[in-house]
Each structure stands twice: as C-alpha cells, then as structure tokens.
Image: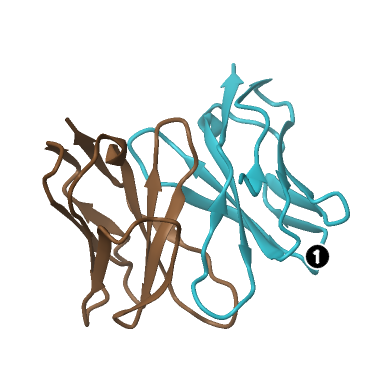
Chain colours: A cyan, B brown
Amino acid sequence: DQQVKQNSPSLSVQEGRISILNCDYTNSMFDYFLWYKKYPAEGPTFLISISSIKDKNEDGRFTVFLNKSAKHLSLHIVPSQPGDSAVYFCAASANRQGAQKLVFGQGTRLTINP
Amino acid sequence: ETGVTQSPTHLIKTRGQQVTLRCSSQSGHNTVSWYQQALGQGPQFIFQYYREEENGRGNFPPRFSGLQFPNYSSELNVNALELDDSALYLCASSFRRGSYNEQFFGPGTRLTVL
C-alpha cells in the first residue's frame, strides 16, 4: 500500500529554468509534509515542509504547494542550479499520539543540465 | 553543533547472522528513528525511540529490535539476517516539540547480506 507516490522516477531540467517535482498521497490523515534531498553516499537532507493548514510555503529558491482536495503537493525550484542535481523525496506524517513516523515516496532523480 | 553520525559505514554479513548498527543523535535531540531504504525505494520506517522507550513501530518483524541510551544514542539490532535485509539503514534524530518535527538523517549504514 503505497500511501505516498512520486510518479516520475526522473526529471531533467535546464540550468536557470524551473524544476517542478510532484507527489501524491492517499491517506487523508496526513497533515504535515516534507521534502528531502539526497546525494549519493549521504543521508537525506531536510529541505522544506508544509502544514496542512497552509497551501504554500516558500524558502529562498524552494516553494512547496499543497492541494488538499487533490491530495497533491509539489516542490518548485527556481532558478535551478547544477548543485540541485540529487534524488528528491516527498514525505508525509500524521498528527497523532505516538511516533512521528515519516512515510516516504519512492523519490525523483533531478538532473540539472548546464 | 554535531550532526547525526552512524557506524559502521558498510557491513557485509551472511544469512542467519546477527548485526548491530549504531547511531549518535544530533546534539539536543531526544528522539531517534530508524529507516530501511532498499535500492530504488524511499526509506521505510522501522521504529522510533523517545526517552529510551520504543515509541512506535512500522511493519517489520520482531527480529528487528532497538535500544536508546541515556545520552539518546541508539542501536538497531537485526537477528537471523535474510538476503532481503540488504539495504541502507538510516538513523534520524529529532526533538519532540508539539506535534511536528523535522527529522535529521545520518549518512546511513550499507548492509549487504550474502
């Protein structure tokens, strides 16, 4: 049961253009969403998050949009830079007692071409 | 501020053996989570420890067990290793405040079971 899905395994974008990574979820109990970036031989690095009470959160070049009715979120990177080339994971969690368990998507490999 | 560290970096074991992986949490963090990342997949939640007690568990068999120590460092133990246990094991630490927290990941331990 894949509760968080990233349907694009890979994405290639020209340097300076916008990168848009997409993520869909099925569990309506999820109320907090995060994006992580992962380089080879390193652990995932936290990028940006959004609570379900918001529909947009911005941090520098990174913006996350949340569409609760569609159970869809996206990460926009503008402008894209070569150092952004990495695997991006979308993750979600539910606000409840107990463990703050993160449920991850399968990841999207982003390649920024010079 | 020291980040999350894990040891060893790589490990090769044979089927049926036991393994212990170690994690030191980021300074000031009191919660540790463990994830298994199979090749080409996103990380999957194994369990979480908060103040030395298991605080939630994912869909993993009892041969996956853990400990958290008073200094908040943690161990993941896997008994009776199977070939499918070959994966990257990630430790993440966080500080529980309210309902939400970003989890900060270590570089992982790559386990190969032959």
Quadrant including the C terminus of chain A: top right
Q: Is residue A68 left or right of residue A39?
A: right
Mark 1 Cα shell of 10 Å, populated few (<14), some (14-19), many (≥20): few
Q: Position of residue B106 (x, y in %)?
A: 33, 53
Seen in the picture, residue A37 relative to A112 is either above or below; the reply is below
Question: Camera-side residue: A108 or B37?
Answer: B37
Seen in the picture, residue A94 relative to B40 is either above or below; the reply is below
Q: Position of residue A50 (x, y in %)?
A: 70, 61
Q: Amino acid at mark 1?
A: Lys
Q: Residue at position x 49%, y 72% from top? A: A99
User: Is residue A76 something one can see in this rendering?
Assistant: no
Element at label 1: loop
Question: Camera-side residue: A40 or B83?
Answer: B83
Q: Is residue B55 left or right of residue A48?
A: left
Disc 1: which residue: A54
Q: Position of residue B71 (x, y in %)?
A: 22, 79
Q: Chain of mark 1?
A: A
User: Is residue B46 something one can see in this rendering?
Assistant: yes
Q: Position of residue B59 (x, y in %)?
A: 45, 56
Q: Residue at position x 68%, y 31% from top? A: A7
